[in-house]
Image (tube, rainbow, N blue to C red):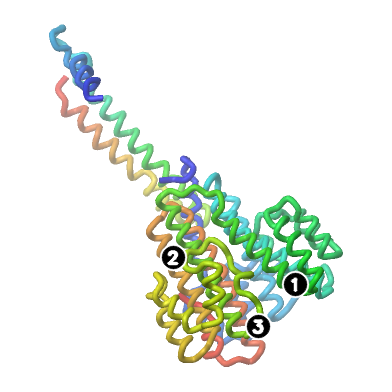
């Protein structure tokens, strides 16, 4: 496991190869945003189904349910900051 | 995490918790204990029982109306829970709700035994278990107890009932049959399930229920002084008693009380056990057992929010509500005082 990680790091850092990394800065930042979105999606899965259940019982809860469901989206927004912080 | 890999437990829990919050609270029970049967029916009409009261209002009145509306609502609620749940959650819930299959079978058998007409047996059924309407109708249509037993062949009640039927033919009393139904239900509860961390606690809860039932049966037998071997009523699966221990304990109630006091349920039950020793009131003790079980299930629901625990705790709470309202309505009809009725209630 550890060996593979080391080799992967070697590939990524392109030791002894050309000067440019395999994944450019911006692409790495984009990956980070994607992973964050993945986490947000997983969080919303449970909240969403609970919210639908609550709305089915009492439709007044629709607004609260909607807000709670999209709260994990903040993860994606915060991760988006990385894109602007990373130099090109 | 989730039982099914899907997000079904979250959905079911949200709905069940919402339903649970609509149950009557202490304040409402207090109001109800001051009302007559007709007023209770009207009060129920303004709450979640509206549909049932309206549907049955033309056919029944007074306490009967209250009672049938309660049964019908109970069946509807539990049917909903089954409809919502999927996968493993369904497996767990349906096993618990088979309690009502057992209840229905017993109702049908008693109806035939007492020669009651089919319509009133049908009215007394609670269609909340796993059996569908068609099977229940078949059971109600059966003319003899033997026919009922034959029609249950292939279900989990089939074999135990067939065995008990021989006993019944010899003795002519219903006890062996009813006992067989109860035992089939309780023993099936824990069979063939695999448990993870959350459901292991659920298993403990089921064991507690079995223990309580064993304790209650033993105490009842000891009180009635009947010459029956308690081991015949023993239900497998509990952790507190074995069959032989229960036989000895039943002849010696003091010992049984001590045993309960020293068990892990001792803290919850200590007040009730004191009452039992002082006042010799079995009713109070049984109420305390029910309250302890209710409290246990509710705690479990809070510890494991995304498991079967909140669902089972709702099922128990709903059953309690139905029994409480029935006790109030019957108590008012019989002219009991408010205090006497309140003693009959299990409020948490």
Q: Which residue is mark 1?
A: B174
Res. B28 visible in picture: no
Give the secondary structure at mark 2: helix
Question: x%, y% of residue B318?
Answer: 55, 67
The chain letter under disc 2 is B
Cα separation between marks 2 and 1: 35 Å
Residue B113, image quadrant: bottom right
Q: Nearer the viewer, mark 2 or mark 1?
A: 1
Q: Spatial distance from mark 2 to mark 3, Cα to Cα? A: 36 Å
Please give the residue where the numbered disc 2 appears in the rendered image.
Answer: B298
Residue placed at 50% from the left, 69% from the top?
Answer: B241
Residue B7 visible in the displayed image: yes
Secondary-structure class at tag 3 = loop
Percent from the top left, x then y, of residue B117? 84, 71
Label 1 chain ID? B
The secondary element bearing badge 1 is classed as: loop
The image shows residue A54, relative to residue B277, as above or below, that is above
Question: Which of the chains bears the disc numbered 3?
Answer: B
First in sequence: mark 2 vs mark 1: 1
The C terminus of chain B - image quarter = bottom left
Dot in front, 2 or 3: 3
- Is disc 2 in the same subunit as disc 3? yes
Residue at image point 55% right, 72% down:
B321
Question: Which residue position holds label 3?
Answer: B226
**Front residue (pair B219, B60):** B219
What residue is drawn where x is 66% and y is 87%?
B333
Disc 1/disc 3 C-alpha distance (Å): 16 Å
Q: Position of residue A63 (x, y in %)?
A: 42, 51
């Amino acid at each position: 496991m550890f060996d593979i990680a080391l080799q992967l790091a070697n590939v990524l850092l392109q030791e002894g190869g050309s000067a440019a990394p395999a994944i450019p800065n911006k692409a790495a930042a984009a990956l980070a945003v994607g992973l964050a979105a993945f986490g947000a999606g997983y969080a919303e899965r449970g909240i969403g189904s609970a919210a639908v259940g609550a709305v089915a019982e009492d439709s007044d809860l629709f607004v609260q349910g909607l807000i709670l469901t999209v709260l994990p989206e903040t993860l994606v927004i915060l991760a988006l900051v990385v894109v602007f912080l990373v130099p090109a | 995490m989730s039982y099914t890999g899907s997000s079904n437990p979250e959905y079911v829990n949200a709905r069940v918790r919402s339903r649970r919050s609509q149950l009557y609270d202490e304040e409402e029970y207090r109001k109800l204990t001051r009302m007559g049967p007709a007023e209770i029916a009207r009060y129920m009409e303004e709450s979640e029982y509206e549909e049932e009261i309206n549907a049955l209002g033309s056919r029944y009145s007074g306490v009967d109306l209250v009672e049938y509306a309660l049964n019908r609502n109970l069946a509807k609620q539990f049917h909903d829970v089954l409809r919502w749940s999927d996968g493993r959650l369904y497996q767990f819930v349906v096993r618990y709700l088979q309690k009502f299959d057992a209840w229905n079978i017993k109702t049908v058998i008693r109806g035939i035994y007492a020669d009651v007409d089919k319509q009133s047996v049908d009215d007394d059924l609670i269609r909340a278990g796993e059996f569908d309407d068609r099977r229940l109708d078949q059971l109600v249509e059966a003319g003899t107890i033997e026919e009922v037993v034959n029609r249950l062949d292939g279900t989990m009640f089939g074999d135990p009932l067939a065995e008990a039927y021989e006993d019944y033919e010899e003795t002519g009393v219903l006890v062996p049959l009813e006992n067989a139904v109860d035992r089939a239900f309780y023993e099936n509860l824990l069979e063939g399930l695999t448990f993870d961390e959350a459901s292991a606690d659920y298993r403990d809860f089921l064991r507690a229920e079995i223990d309580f039932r064993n304790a209650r049966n033993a105490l009842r037998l000891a009180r009635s002084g009947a010459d029956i071997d308690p081991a015949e009523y023993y239900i497998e699966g509990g952790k507190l008693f074995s069959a032989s221990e229960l036989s000895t304990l039943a002849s010696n109630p003091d010992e049984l009380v001590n045993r309960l006091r020293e068990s892990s349920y001792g803290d919850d039950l200590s007040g009730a056990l004191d009452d039992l020793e002082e006042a010799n009131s079995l009713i109070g003790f049984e109420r305390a057992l029910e309250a302890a079980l209710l409290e246990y299930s509710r705690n479990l629901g809070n510890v494991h929010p995304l498991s079967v625990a909140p669902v089972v705790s709702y099922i128990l709470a709903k059953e309690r509500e139905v029994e409480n309202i029935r006790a109030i309505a019957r108590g008012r009809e019989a002219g009991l005082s408010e205090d006497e009725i309140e003693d009959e209630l299990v409020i948490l």
